[in-house]
Image (cartoon, grey):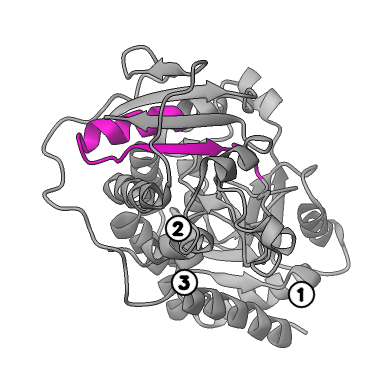
Amino acid sequence: CPSYFAWIENDLAPWKETGISQQNLQDARSKADFRVVIVNGTLYMERYNKCFETRDDFTLWGLLMLLKEYPGMVPDVDLMFNCGDWPLVFRAEHQPEKNGSWPPPPLFLYCTSRGDHYDIVFPDWSYWGWPEVNILPWSLEKGKIFSGAKKLDWSHRQPIAFWKGNYDMGPARADLVKCTANNTHNYNLVTYHQDWFAERERNFNNSDLSKQCQHRYKIYVQGGGWSVSFKYILACGSTVLQIEPMFQEFFARSLIPFVHFWPVDRDNICNSTKFAVDWGNAHPKEAAAIGECAKSFLDKDLSMDFVYQYMLQLLREYGKLLKFKPVPPPEAQRMTLESSLPGHELTLPRNGPRPRKVCTLANSISADMMLSKQREGYKRIKLQAT
């Protein structure tokens, strides 16, 4: 079982002793965009707010696919879901010693912070497609990027760092772009602005991710909140330079600095990036191995089978905590694969046999140990790049 499964226990730990009551669930409603109730294998949805683009549609589609993949195995659950880019349940506001604020409201979300929030992390919508930016379901997009990466070996790629994205999202990106605007220093870095409105008009001619594997180093930097692009950047097999993130998705919490990616100091982006590139070009075998290790992780540990199994395990453990029997609310809409198709021609359920067994929760390395390794990596790079 992939090591990121260990985070399920960690995410649900706040409710281990108290369980989750109906009042706890209602406390999360003010932060939720929609509510999901699953009873006897049937999914019901009550919408509170329309999510950005089609995030809610594809998330619900993913849950419907889970019910089809594992018939009779998904427990009855009642949960609140937010589809934004920022975790919302602050640890500082919910402490065990403050009885009135404990336990925290159980809220499902696509990301969390590294220790400051209690949000329950769930796979994001893009695993089933992101048509607004012409991205296919993960299994197809991953294969497409893998094929593109094979066309140019790491050693033959441009020996500099590459980033393409929206310049106007967040201070870290603004600081990164300043590195390329400085004509007095060569930081071995190129950046390109991604204008999605213009790109749609050009039929996405310049945004094919499979054609962005031409540099030895690729940068992941978050915008104003969490950014969904990490897995696509890792898929090239380039050495990924990750500017220290504020937020993380479910699988990223198990990635280890200097094994799956090279950490970049958020407070010294230009010099830290240059240090990484210079080191990699001086140690090409070791740098290429980091990119290959990340690519192998995606291939073996982030298959759709494991994504579904993570969803299943999370809902199973969450369901055990409920202190009430889930019942569809009166205003809820019954969702089906036939009636809820989100408009993506390539999100149809797969054919073929289901996995013979469900993997068990990982116990080889704890969530706390993974978090500690990440913190140590960024602490180490601060010293090296100064």
Q: Amino acid at mark 3?
A: Ala
SS for tag 1? Answer: helix
Label 1 CA crowd tier, 10 Å (few <14, some 14–19, many 20+): many
Label 2, secondary structure: give it.
loop
The circle drawn on residue 367 is: 3
Q: Which residues are magenta?
A: 59-85
Instruction: Choose top left, top right, bottom left or bottom right for residue 383.
Output: bottom right
Tag 1: residue type?
Asn
Pointer 3 with pointer 1, Cβ within 8 A: no
Q: Could you tell me which quadrant the C terminus lies in?
A: bottom right
Q: Give percent across and percent down for residue 346.
A: 34, 24
For discs 3 and 1, the disc positioned in front in the rendered view: 3
Q: Which residue is mark 1?
A: 271
The residue wearing badge 2 is 251
> What is the crowding at mark 3: few (fewer than 14 residues within 10 Å), some, or many (at least 20)?
many
Distance of label 2 from label 1 (alpha carbons)? 28 Å
Q: Nearer the viewer, residue 39 or 384?
A: 39
Q: Earlier in the sequence, mark 2 or mark 3?
A: 2
User: In screen coordinates, is 182 left or right of 353?
Assistant: right
